[in-house]
Amino acid sequence: MADLGATFLYLTKKSSHVLAGETAADFTPIFYMLGFGLLASVPALILSRLLSPRRRYNPVKFLPMECGQMPTGEGRSHFMMQYYAYILMFVVFDVMAIFLYAWGTALFNIPRAATLPIIGFLAIMFTAMGYALYLAGRKGIW
């Protein structure tokens, strides 16, 4: 009876160590989805290749067309540089928000020494923001 109780306690005890078998077992639904994706997509690709009609070369098909008409004018257009500063600042704020959100969710679970790298990160990001504002002010587009 004592062995049975010890075995029960051993099986129900939560361990902080994760075994390799338990980790692989956690990924079985992902492996099933990967297998199903391959099982469904590979035959579909093969069948579409076998059943598709053979296309002959048509020179009209490779002409540059816009809505069935021949294009006129220049192919390149002028990019408004006044929006460059907005685009650059959006990218900087976007990257900053992603990393600050991840840092903020783990803030209470990390040591205080982890605050120094985020301060460095913010310094780099605000330097990029200042450079974008400098460029915008220098070109007179802000």
Image (spheres, rainbow, N blue to C red):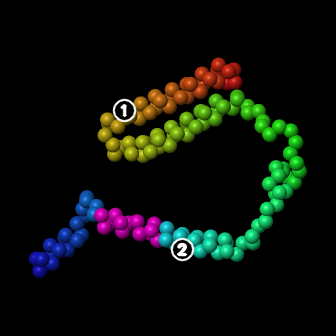
Residue 59, above or below 110: below
Q: Between residues 126 and 48, which one lies in front from this camera angle?
A: 48
For image coordinates 79% across by 65% down, the residue present is: 56
For image coordinates 41% across by 69% down, the residue present is: 28
N-terminal label among 1 and 2: 2
Residue count near mark 2 (Cα–Cα under 10 Å), binned few <14, some 14–19, many ≥20: few
Residue of label 1: 116
> Residue 136 location in percent, x, y?
64, 24
Q: CA distance from mark 1 to mark 2?
A: 49 Å
Which callout, 1 or 2, points to the residue nearer the camera? Answer: 2
| Quadrant the N terminus occupies | bottom left
Q: Amino acid at mark 1?
A: Leu
Q: Residue furthest left?
A: 2
| Quadrant the C terminus occupies | top right
Q: The residue tagged with tag 2: helix, strand or loop?
A: helix
Q: Assess whether residue 32 is covered by the magenta stretch.
A: yes
For image coordinates 65% across by 75% down, the residue present is: 47
Position of 4 compared to 34: left or right? left
Q: Quadrant of residue 62?
A: bottom right
Position of 101 compared to 59: left or right? left
Picture disc at residue 39: 2
Q: Between residues 89 and 39, which one lies in front from this camera angle?
A: 39
Q: Quadrant of residue 52?
A: bottom right
Q: Which residues are magenta?
A: 20-33
Tell me the chief SS of the magenta region.
helix
Q: Quadrant of residue 137?
A: top right
For image coordinates 15% across by 73% down, the residue present is: 6
> Residue 80 location in percent, x, y?
73, 31
Picture disc at residue 36: none
Q: Residue furthest bottom?
A: 1
Q: Between residues 61 and 103, which one lies in front from this camera angle?
A: 61
